[in-house]
Amino acid sequence: MRHHRIRQQAGVATLALLLLSAPPAEAQQSLADDAEVATALHLLDIWMDAAQAYGGIPGASLSVVHDQELVWAKGYGFAHVESGEPATPSTMYSICSISKLFTAVGVLQLRDQGKLALNDPVAKHLDWFNIQDKYPEAGPVDIEGLLTHSSGLPREAGVPYWTGPDYPFPTHEKIVETLPTQTMLYPPRTYFQYSNLALTLAGEIVAEASGQSYDDYVRANILDPLGMTSTFTDLEDRFRGNRLATGYTARGRDGKRHVIPDYWVRGISPAAGFISTVEDLGRFASWQFRVLEGGDALLDRNTLREMHRVHWSEPDGNTTYGLGFSVWKSDDDTFVGHGGSCPGYRSHLLLRPQDKVATAFMTNGQGVNSRQFAQTAFDIVAPALQAAAKRAQADSPMEEAMARIVTVTGPAYLQRYTGTYQRPLGGESEVLMWDGSVQVLSLPTNNPLSSLTRLRHIEDGTFRRVRDNGDLGEEFIFEEMPDGSMRMWRNDNYSVRPAGM
């Protein structure tokens, strides 16, 4: 059992009392203090905790950002399973292909300085770019093609670096040596073909056009100005075994995972080499929100808008890409960001610029749907953040704030039924306050918002399920036992919340 859940449930009621006695809304600094946001974060925490445990995920970290505030961040499971070292918000993970975003920012910074143009042929900047070209009539590979994965280049750099156990990522010298043995896959500007080779070459252009090493340029012009002190362009030995989480394979048929041996990404770093934390990616997201408001000198806001717009779309419309950024829709909302997958790690950064909300997810286990975690976090918390931000701007009076707390958290006397109940056939039922009423969340679940069952309080410990059409269904009866445990009866069977929980 995870004791922190009940403490947090009690924390919702405590938060309500604190807010009732708090100064007016304008004095409240953090959106995390808003009652509606707090209940959303509580649901997110409950879901993520169960997803990590039941999913057999070694460790994971998750953060939520609104504009310039890191609203929430937490770790789950273990950074190092063998030593029992817990994952935290400051745990480092390889963020793999999210590295491409930093490379793209570097390219556009240099474009704005007049040191390159997006329609420049790659060969203009890299005199060693001599891949075998079967389609010379289609024109040269240009920089925009690199950033949109429409260059026609093959996916990889001609070396089996995704193959264990050694994962032999090539050096710069090896990439230069191998390129003449490779052949164009398609004519430029014909198909989308995700390409680590393409973004590696974009990183080489950053170095060539700036006159600095790739690492020096990115650190001086992106990482250091943003205060991203826990982000590096490759897996550094000094962090292994401590801040850098140990990477693990996907689960095999026997359900087991295995430690991934140490490796270095070397020359492929601009495409897949960075390590970072969910806190630092939160800083990267907040920076983008500042840029879009015209409040940062590192990048022009119209340039970032250009990067966020779709520059390439496959005919079916299902694959869309900006300049370095993946662009996609979920429930008719448009998002930008990027995912990452490499030996032992999965990650995802998601931004909804219109709402100034971002989520970042990282894990040290392969075989995890990182985008699902980032998207679900957004779906749970973003509506509450948007509503809280509007209330803060509207300078709501105390009476309004008090009424909202009761609406969100429900009557305080119902809190006694909340907590974690063990189901007789396995799994858990989490009873929590959500949207002003007692609700039951079945765990584990991939879709927490659609897995909630709303209850209506009838009397004492008796509730009834509220059907989708508003009619009342079966009873849920809560029975406190002499030993202090609580039973939740439904359909003549019961789940148990142990005493003290």
Image (tube, rainbow, N blue to C red):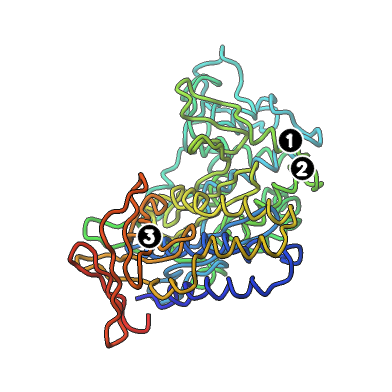
C-alpha distance separating marks 1 and 2: 7 Å
Q: Would you identify the image quadrant in which residue 444 lies?
A: bottom left
User: 455 above or below 488?
Assistant: above
Give the residue at mark 3: 456
Give the residue at mark 1: 303
Q: Which of marks 2 and 3 is nearer the N terminus?
A: 2
Question: Which amino acid type corresponds to the residue marked 3 in the rendered image?
Answer: Arg
Between 422 and 87, the one nearer to me in the picture:
422
Left or right, 182 with respect to 351, comes to left
Give the residue at mark 2: 299
Instruction: Report x, y in % for residue 84.
Output: 41, 77
Q: Are marks 1 and 2 in contact (CB under 8 Å)?
A: yes
C-alpha distance separating marks 2 and 3: 52 Å
Residue projecting furthest to the top: 137
Q: Is mark 2 on a helix, strand or loop?
A: loop
Instruction: Report x, y in % for residue 209.
Output: 74, 38
